[in-house]
Image (cartoon, helix red, strand yellow):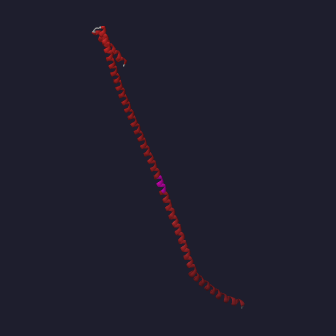
Amino acid sequence: MGTLDLVSIVPWEIITQLINLLLLFLLLKHFLFKPVQNILNARQAAIDKSYADADSALNKAEELRDEYEKRISDAKAEASDIVKSATRKAQANGEEIIRDAQAQAAHLLEKADMQIEQEKKKAMNELKDEISGIAVDIASKVVEREIDEKDHEALISEFIKGVGEAS
């Protein structure tokens, strides 16, 4: 009778325990699992949002880096252009200075040549004055010695010819 009582009691207790377990599971599912699941979903959403924000920030940072590198590259190119332009301007200025110096030198040479020519003419005029004085002296000597006119002209011509060759 002991075994029969156990078998008849066990299924009823097992069924109640199963019903209690099922009710407990439903209650836990409704009051515990759903809120915990909602909290886990909210956390997962926050984590996913954090990852998305991090990816967005990373993409923005890469864009900014690319833009920065482009600006640096553009600045280097612009600096290179400025240096090239300044070099060209400096060369042009240097060439202009050289041309001006050459023009001034040519002008100074021309001026010096003109002064030399003037000094030459002045010296020639002074020489002619001296020759004239000497010719007068010769003429007076000739008059004193009474040389004929042909001799007198020959003397003057010779003297002038000798002075012309000397200059």
Residue 94 lies in the magenta-colored region: no
Residue at position x 57%, y 77% in the image = 36
In the rendered picture of this protein, how many numbered marks are placed on residues? 0
Residue 89's quadrant in the figure? top left
Residue 72 lies in the magenta-colored region: yes
Q: Residue furthest bottom?
A: 1
Residue 105 x/y as whole percent: 39, 33
112 sits left or right of 63 in the view = left
Residue at position x 69%, y 89% in the image = 6
> Which is nearer the eye, 108 or 158?
158
> Which is nearer the eye, 53 or 69?
69
Q: Is residue 75 above or below residue 40?
A: above
Q: Is residue 154 above or below residue 25?
A: above
Residue 4 x/y as whole percent: 69, 90
Q: Which residues are magenta?
A: 68-73
Residue 5's quadrant in the figure? bottom right
124 sits left or right of 56 in the view = left
Residue 160, can we see it? no
Residue 29 x/y as whole percent: 57, 80
Q: Residue furthest right?
A: 2
Residue 16, can we see it? yes
Q: Is residue 148 above or below residue 91?
A: above
Residue at position x 48%, y 53% in the image = 72
Residue 108 x/y as whole percent: 38, 32
> Which is nearer the eye, 78 or 56?
78
Q: Is residue 124 above or below residue 146?
A: below
